Amino acid sequence: MINDWLLVLALIVLFLLPRESDLFAEGLDQEHYLQSLIDQATEKRLSQQRYWHLLLHYKKSIFGKYESQEDGLSFFNSPGGKSDPQAELLATLSSFFKKNEGFKKGEKHPQCNFPARFKWLSKQLSFDTSRFPKPACSLLEGWLEELNPRRITLVFASYYMNNPASMFGHTLLRIDTKREGPDQSLLNYGINYAATPDTDNPLMYTLKGLFGFFKGRFSVFPYYTKVQQYSNIDNRDLWEYELNFSEDQMNDLLLHLWELGGNYFDYLYFQENCSYHLLALLEVANPDLHLTDSFFYHVIPADTIKVVTRNDNLVVKRVYRPSLLSQMNNKRLKMTPPQDAMLQQLVKDSSWLERDEYRSLEISDKVLILDTYLDYAQYRNMRNRKEEKAPTEGDRKILLARSRLRYQRQDQGMIQFSTLPELGHGSDWLKIGVGRSAGQTFEEISYRPAYHDLLAKDIGYGKDSQILFLDLTARYYNDLEETKLDRLKIIEIISLTPYDRLLQKKSWRFGFGIDSIKDFDCHFCHSFKTSYGLGFSYKSSYANPFLLYALVDSEVEFSKRLDHDYRVGGGGTIGLLLDLTEDWRVQILGNILAFPLGHESDYYKVSINQRVALTQHSDLRVEMSQMEGKDEWVLSGNYYF
């Protein structure tokens, strides 16, 4: 009897187990099906289609060969996939037939790992999905369900005060999920692409960033964390551009973002930076866009906004999100000078609330002062990274006083302290001019790839700030019949932030590069020099057309034409910037330097420079100067592109 039961059980097990012949037949069927797909893909030349190149980030080199900008090897299914689109396509098709078993911990089936490729190839080759293995892609499905996009917004973090380097800006994406309720934007997710630095050394940080030794990765995070960082801590206004993508296009973007998630690109400050690969992501969502084609050797975040906004119907809505500092300054501009003085008294001593001057104010004026104070307290705490600490005794006193007023202030209009980045002039600059220096006439040509100088129109840029990179000027002297290098500003930064008793920001400048020595006759010799200046600027109000500044300077120069091959000194600069009209700006400055170390010398220089804008991207300039009795003038036409 037992033997009979064992026999029945054995027959049942044998019936339930797949037979080897069935597995063999299934394997043969999949092989035949794979081969048919490969034949179709080859016949349709799918590996040469643009969308395949977008998915794999292939770019054609000057020698006509394709190479992917992606640098993580796990991004490719073929060993030669980085430079061979056809091999990668065939290997990808083959990988989709892998059995579900045998993956190491953390590894995913290729169908789960490359869902954007699976979706596109399925559409092109009309996949019979019943003939593919069916892996469980629960992580991907859960991720898509969590993001569940309703719209996608491109966000530009504007410049922030006293840091001209931020003029380059930063871009990220925001995914607005399908969530009920008014203004849920802060609860959405952000997509950021950034370098993963492995050093705190400023020099190494710069070199690694310039030459691509950092890995750049995409990350997804709660959007409010970036608002906290950019808007509240760094005080950068945000410009948000809602993009016109269909639901299917947003799905394509997310599927491809998933593919990129575990991989990396070599991060390059001026090419493959925070903005460039975001554009590539948008192209995957809508292959009709040709956003990355606009950039060759450098990509500046503000320029990527210009490219995006130039595409018809891509941007459906713009939103200005002022920083905490801009919100506070907006309230301060509504104050009278006595009210602003009261605010500053409150910052010094909260017991000033007990004074008759405050008690006699109208309730609306009290609220304006107290609300501005609370903005300032939050700004101060953010700057000091004390947001987790309890309010000070003074802050608590102000909060209590404000809560007792029970008055809702109705602000009318918000001043935009930054301007739309797409309205700014081009970041490349070409100058052609004629002039005369110390009796020699010359023609002059200048070029720089970036970015913005003090005389240029500052729409779209930080006000009264300058950052120049690789600014090169050469002159052809007619009498000598020779071309001479006049200067190469490797980098020059100027930040003229008006001094405010409340914020107490200083003005400063820094630069290094090669310059002609003109304070004594050394026959067009050059020095390598670095300089630094620190001081204050004055501007009576935000809209005032003039700004006055004074800096204490230090300078070091190296040249074989100097005694002991160097000189070290210091001095001072006084300058004035005056906007006579919207298009006419005048700069007057004088500086004096004395070098007690090395080559003992001193000189003074006075300059008057004027710019008249012809368009947003072109202007005429007249620059006149006198140094140690030697006059120089240059008349030039300038074009930004």
Image: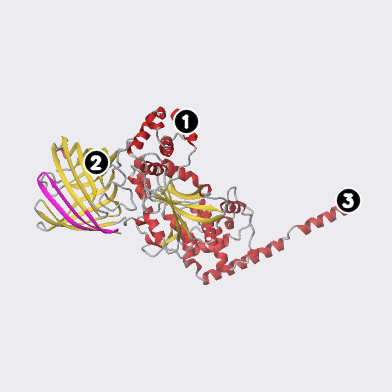
- In the image, what residue occupies the spot 48% across and 63% down? 286
Residue 139 visible in the shown view: yes
Q: Earlier in the sequence, mark 3 or mark 2?
A: 3
Figure check: 368 above or below 390: below
Amino acid type assigned to the residue bearing label 2 in the image: Tyr
Q: Position of residue 342 (x, y in %)?
A: 36, 34
Horizontal side of 142 relative to 567 (left or right) equals right
Figure check: 526 above or below 115: above
Magenta-drawn stretch contains 617: yes
User: What's the distance in space between the residues labelled 1 and 3, CA to CA?
Assistant: 86 Å
Quarter-of-image position of residue 360: top left
Query: Which residue in the structure is indicated by mark 2?
Result: 549
Q: Earlier in the sequence, mark 1 or mark 3?
A: 3
- Residue in the foreground of this view, choosing between 284 and 2: 284
Q: Earlier in the sequence, mark 2 or mark 1?
A: 1
Magenta-drawn stretch contains 636: yes
Helix, strand or loop at label 1? It is helix
What residue range appears in magenta?
611-637
Horizontal side of 220 relative to 412 (left or right) equals right
Horizontal side of 444 relative to 502 (left or right) equals left
Tell me the tag on residue 396: 1
Query: Which residue in the structure is indicated by mark 3?
Result: 2
- Residue in the foreground of this view, choosing between 83 and 396: 396
Amino acid type assigned to the residue bearing label 3 in the image: Ile
Tell me the tag on residue 536: none
